[in-house]
Amino acid sequence: MFQINENYQKLPGSYLFSTIAKKVNAYQAANPDANIIRLGIGDVTQPIAPAIIEAMHKAVDEMGHAETFRGYAPDLGYDFLRKAIADNDYRARGCDISEDEIFVSDGAKSDSANIQELFSANSRIAVCDPVYPVYVDSNVMAGRTGSYDKEKETWSDVIYMPCTAENNFVPEFPKETPDMIYLCLPNNPTGTTLTKSQLQEWVDYANKVGAVIIYDAAYEAYISESDVAHSIYECEGARTCAIELRSFSKNAGFTGVRLGFTVVPKDLKCGEVSLNAMWARRHGTKFNGAPYIVQRAGEAVYSDAGKAQLKEQVAYYMNNAKTIKEGLAAAGYTVFGGVNAPYIWLKTPSGMTSWEFFDFLLEKANVVGTPGSGFGPSGEGYFRLTAFGNYENTVRALERIKAL
Ligand code: MLT
């Protein structure tokens, strides 16, 4: 008789955004006339920029001719894209990252879930609390998190680093020494971030204790303040302790196109073993490369026209963030984030729990957000709204919230 991976049985409930989608669909079915505005999952709404569409069309045409047709993509990514990434995201910012340290993938979600495979089963992970659920859930599936405490909603073998208004959303170094530290900056879900010097302290700490930082920089395009690092490799010493995950979803609207990459520096080693070589081995075995058409689309993100168009798109979403933040503050809410990230993190009013506020907002305003407690126990009493809606809906949602 076959046996299953029992670790899956330990996972509580379903994936956060699936639970929300189910609740919203049930509400819509019961209230077919309700005009629901979705500011829950961080899914983009603006169309793909023209320069990128043009590049995709061209690549589609190439696929229709024998001379220019492409089959399997190189499993680590086409050179043209790896070079564009190295030049624009790293060398242009003074970071010492080369093409062969960049691994192109189908997105940061899968990379952030898969990267834990490189580490031993008994590695201790440290996560910010609240946290993007994929980091914890993927380690649960791998059997690395111990047992679940239903009351506290925590795992016995996970080190939680609370990030709340009380500590300005800056995680403190944990008392126990972790082996893997997940940092998402600018942060999902709180929309806050660390300064470059605060990040440098984490790099120094990781090098000192021999931990690896899994650095999720999916929201770097939204950074507006100059003392915030766009890449962890802007910090000295990061090449020996950090893996960086990047996405094209949020900066270029690729949530439905799928493209991302992971940087594993060659200086990142466990004894003599190179993690770069391990990730290459993993990628080669388990992944057949992102599609040519999509990688050409990714290349166009770095063209002059692409850059200009995407700057406008980011500004559009950040105008939504400003509208939400200022509107909520004027209505008496306590709000955070929204300056270097497209997420607004607010305190729920009148002592409501995160899920109570979710239901209240859905029923009374027909607005969907994300309950803070879905991201971890320290998210209780908070709520997330995304700036990725369209402007008209964002304004309409705020009017409804203000009228409550
Ligand atoms: C979110 O809403 O947190 C994100 O959209 C989830 C994701 O990027 O996978």
Image (cartoon, rainbow, N blue to C red):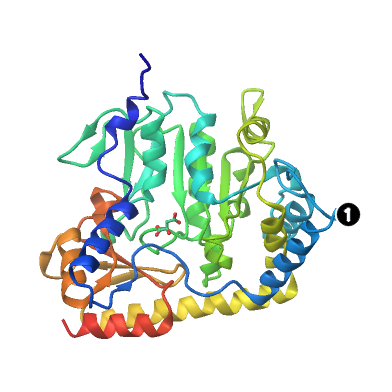
Q: What x and y, as percent, mark residue 164? A: 28, 57
- Relative to 315, residue 69 above or below: above
**For the N terminus, which image quadrant?**
top left
- Relative to 165, residue 100 above or below: above
Judge by depth and name the residue closer to the eye, 288 or 188.
288
**For the C terminus, which image quadrant?**
bottom left
Query: Whereabouts is ligand 1, in terms of quadrant?
Result: bottom left
- Relative to 1, residue 39 above or below: below
> What residue lies at 37% left-to-right and 40% top-to-bottom?
136
Q: Ligand 1 within 8 A of label 1's CB?
A: no
> What residue lies at 53% left-to-right and 55% top-to-bottom?
217
- Relative to 191, residue 77 above or below: above
Asked whether, in this view, residue 162 is left or right of residue 403, the answer is right
- Element type at marker 1? loop
Q: What x and y, as percent, mark residue 250? A: 52, 64
> Can the viewer see residue 347?
no
Asked whether, in this view, residue 329 is left or right of residue 104, the answer is left
Query: Which residue is labeled 1 in the image?
Result: 67
Residue furthest to the top in view is 1
> Can the viewer see residue 186?
yes
Type of the residue with mark 1: Glu
Judge by depth and name the residue closer to the eye, 363 or 267.
363
Q: What x and y, as percent, mark residue 132? A: 38, 51
